[in-house]
Image: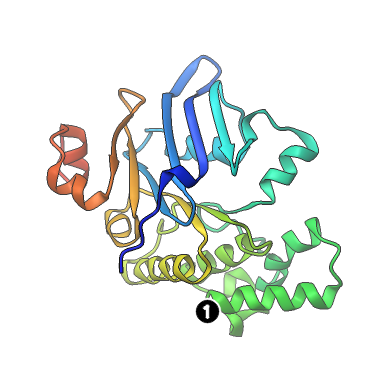
Amino acid sequence: MKVRHSVDDAIVRVSNLTCAYGDAVIVDDISFDVARGEIFVILGGSGCGKSTVLKHLIGLYAPYHGQILIDGQDIGRASGAMLLEIQKRFGVMYQMGALFGSMSLIENVRLPLQEHTQLPPEAMDLIARMKLEQVGLAAYAHHLPSQISGGMQKRAAIARAMALDPGILFLDEPSAGLDPITSAGVDALIKQLSESLGVTFVIVTHELASIFAIAQRVIMLDKESKKIVAQGNPHDLRNDSTHPVVSAFFNRRAD
C-alpha cells in the first residue's frame, strides 16, 4: 500500500528562502515543506544551489532572507545552545561520508553520543553496534574507513547520522562516486530505514536512478532563474512536465 504524507504535518518548512554568499544570490525566494516521514529530494543541475540549500537547512549558514523551521523551530535565527538543541534533532550524512580515517567505524558512530550524551561507555558501544547492524555493517565495527568500500563508508556515515535517533536525516549526494549496483544498495537501505523507522529523509542528489527509486516527492532548482521550477512526484515530472529544463533533466537531454 502506498504511504501518503501530508505537508500539513510538515517537519521542515521553508518560507521565502533566499541564499546568498555576499552579494551573490544563489537561490532566490523559494518555499517548500517536507512532510513527516517523507523521502524528499532536492535536485537540479550543477551549480543550481542544492548543497547551498542543504547547508542552510542544517544551520551551517543563516538565510539572507526568509525562514527555515525544523519541527516548528526557526533554525535560521537560532544560535548557541538553541541551535545545538535543534541540530540534535537531525542527523547529517555529508558527501563522501566524511568519516574520520584514524577511527574505527564503531568509534565514528560513537562520536555524536560522546558529544551530546552522558551515557556510560558500554551503553554508547551498544548503541553504536546497533546502528552499524541497522546498516549491515555489524561485522566491520573495528575496521578503519580505508579498509572498507566506498558504499560501506556511506552506510557507516548513515549509521553515525542515526546515532542520536533523530527524526530527520539529511543526506548529501549519497550515491556520489558509487557504481550502479552499490548505489542501488544504498537506495534500498534508505527505503528500508524509512519504512522501518519512520524517519524523514531530505536528500540532495542529481542521480536519476536514485531519484526514481526512492523519492516520494522532489523539488527541482534551476541555476538560471534561481527558483524552484518543478515539484512533485519524479515519475509524473518525467512523463508530464512541459518545462524545457525539467523535461531535459528527467529525460537526460542536452539543452
Res 132 quadrant in image: bottom right
Characterize the local packing of mark 1: few (<14), some (14-19) or many (20 or more) Cα atoms within 10 angstroms: some
Along the horizontal axis of the image, is 122 left or right of 29?
A: right
Q: Nearer the viewer, residue 241 or 25?
A: 241
Q: Residue at x 67, y 61 (%)?
A: 100
> Relative to 151, is 10 above or below?
above
Q: Residue at x 44, y 69 (%)?
A: 195
x, y (%) of residue 150?
48, 67
The C terminus lies in which quarter of the figure? Answer: top left
The N terminus lies in which quarter of the figure? Answer: bottom left
Along the horizontal axis of the image, is 246 left or right of 186?
A: left
Along the horizontal axis of the image, is 201 left or right of 230?
A: right
Along the horizontal axis of the image, is 29 left or right of 220?
A: right
Q: Residue at x 42, y 44 (%)?
A: 7
Res 225 quadrant in image: top left
> Relative to 44, is 27 above or below?
above
| Extreme residue in the top direction | 23
In the structure shown, which secondary structural element does the residue marked by tag 1 occupy? loop
Residue under numbered circle 1: 136
Inspect the image, locate mark 1, and give the three-letter code of the amino acid beneath it. Gly
x, y (%) of residue 124?
77, 72
Q: Nearer the viewer, residue 45 or 3?
A: 3
x, y (%) of residue 213?
30, 62
Q: Nearer the viewer, residue 97 or 221?
A: 221
